[in-house]
Amino acid sequence: MKQGKARFDYQLNKVNLLLTESKNHENSPLWLLLNDLRTPMFMLESLSKIYTKFHDKVFFTELKERFKEIEDALGAIDHYAEFLREFHADEKIPESIKSYLENKTREKVTAFNEILTKGGWNNGKAITKINEGLEIAKWQEEEEEIANIEKYYGKQISKIKEFITETTFDFDNIEDDVHELRRKLRWLSIYPHAFQGAIQLHETKGSATQLEKYLTEETVSSPFNQLPESENLSHHLYLEKNHFLALSWIIADLGNLKDKGLKITELKDAFQEIFFLKDAEAMNESYLVLGEEHPKMETLLQKASVVSKAFFEEKILDKLIWGAD
């Protein structure tokens, strides 16, 4: 079996097991969220994104959209459910806001269930059809595939640099600037896991000293920074270990700032939808609920701008790819 198909099989088996087990639970969509269907869908989406570039573009684009639809639906549920979990016991949060989040969560769960049903995920037809297509796909030999993965990875780095150049680090929107930058950076950390050992880390002399501020204990010990290995591969793409860890650090830091910012915007949207407030009024209500200890949006955007500018000025992404064998 070619490695490309094996990578899809590995993740699809996880999906199939979760879908099968979910039938034993009353609220199967919520069970799937809580039992992390989202991660294998992320992996499948990332594989499809890359294979569209050097395999059957039509087929793998269709796969990418199917996996993305599931992942987006799960993300939408998680978005509201996470705020609901956080706000549930907070007496400062009005009951009307909590009810709003409950309704939004149910709405997204219903939408996800419709996707599972219409898409044939609940009855196994979706996975069967996907496997049929994967079975006849013309997979590349290992060495050629690694060369193409390296080329794709390099192009994604170039696109991120173009994106950040366009913003000139003048962030004014938590979703369009901070969240979007983090999304793009995060894919660079997802691909190595999706490729099940084809991408490995290589530590170069002196890089740990140069990047010491990024190499926190939390970053270095994170399970997500331990890449899968494979004894069946002869060719690999290597990423410089400490630059990869620095990438992980900036993803986590931007994620923290993003979460605090989205908490503001979620409350603002809720106040507007429930009480028909103008932007400024709804924002003020959000700040009153969150309290003085919660940073203002301007502060969060400024911090994200500063930390991103420092990261890119050190040209960490330029030194991320070490080479292939």
Image: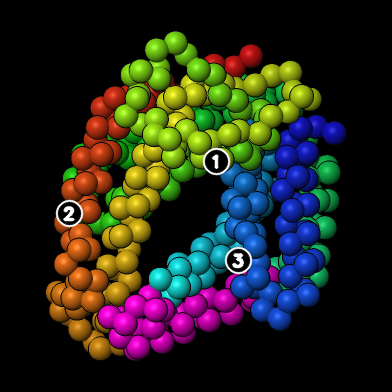
Disc nearer the start of the sequence (1/2): 1
The image shows residue 290, relative to residue 131, as above or below, that is: below
Query: What distance separates the C-alpha of mark 1 from that of mark 2?
Result: 29 Å
Q: Main secondary structure of the magenta part?
A: helix
* Residue nearest the viewer, comparing 292 with 146: 292
The image shows residue 132, relative to residue 28, as above or below, that is: above
Q: Is residue 96 visible?
A: yes
Q: Amino acid at mark 2?
A: Thr
Relative to 178, 79 lies left or right: right
The image shows residue 126, relative to residue 252, as above or below, that is: below
Query: What distance separates the C-alpha of mark 3 from that of mark 1?
Result: 19 Å
* Residue at image location 58% in from the left, 34% down from the top: 226
Q: Which residue does the numbered mark 2 point to in the structure image?
A: 299
The x, y position of residue 316, in whole percent, is: 36, 26
Q: Which quarter shows the N terminus? A: top right
Q: Are marks 3 and 1 in contact (CB under 8 Å)?
A: no
Q: Which quarter shows the C terminus? A: top right
For residue 293, what is the image quadrant? Answer: bottom left
Disc nearer the start of the sequence (2/3): 3
Q: Which residue does the numbered mark 3 point to in the structure image?
A: 33
The x, y position of residue 280, in whole percent, is: 14, 74
Q: Which residue does the numbered mark 1 point to in the structure image?
A: 224
* Residue at image location 17% in from the left, 54% down from the top: 299
What secondary structure is marked by label 3? helix
